[in-house]
Amino acid sequence: MGSPGSVFEWVQGRFAEVLEVDPADVALDSQLAADLDADSIDLIEVVNGAEKEYGVTIEEQDLYDLETVGQLVALIDSARTS
């Protein structure tokens, strides 16, 4: 269990891989749709990976209101500590 930075770094790398973008283009304040052009399938792919990586379960309804990478990182962090 690393620091929140390590969760961000994991999410950053995963989005870069899924979306085929430079990891430097993925920031905490990046808008999933507007900045990264990520759709719901991309988001679910990243979330499924996070569930396996961190041994957490994230409810699908929790994804509906996500707008930024930082919100996703916070959601993963809260799942890890609950």
Image (cartoon, helix red, strand yellow):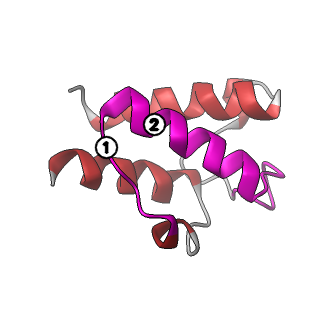
Residue type marked 1: Val
Q: Could you say where residue 32 lies in the image, as x and y percent from the top left?
A: 70, 56
Q: Position of residue 33 (x, y in %)?
A: 78, 60
Residue 11: x, y in percent? 53, 35
Residue located 79% across and 35% down the image: 19
Q: Is residue 57 above or below residue 5?
A: below
Determine which quarter of the picture holds residue 31. bottom right
Q: Quadrant of the N terminus?
A: top left
| Helix, strand or loop status at disc 2 | helix
Q: Residues within 10 Å of mark 1 (few under 14, many from 20)?
A: some
Q: What residue is rendered at 74% in x and 31% in y?
A: 18
User: Mark 1 touching mark 2, by CB under 8 A?
Assistant: yes
Which quadrant of the figure contains the C terminus? bottom left
Does residue 41 show up magenta in the picture? yes
Q: Residue furthest left?
A: 82
Residue at 56 percent across and 75 percent down: it is 65
Residue 66, picture quadrant = bottom right
Residue 73 in the figure: left or right of residue 80 = right
* Residue at mark 1 to residue at mark 2: CA–CA distance: 8 Å
For label 1, the SS is loop
In depth, the one of 62 and 22 nearer the eye is: 62
In this picture, residue 78 sits left or right of residue 71: left
Q: Where are the magenta residues, as a range?
A: 32-60
Q: Which mark is residue 50?
A: 2
How many tags in the picture? 2
The residue type indicated by label 2 comes to Ala
Residue 33 part of the magenta-drawn span: yes
| Residue denoted by label 1 | 56
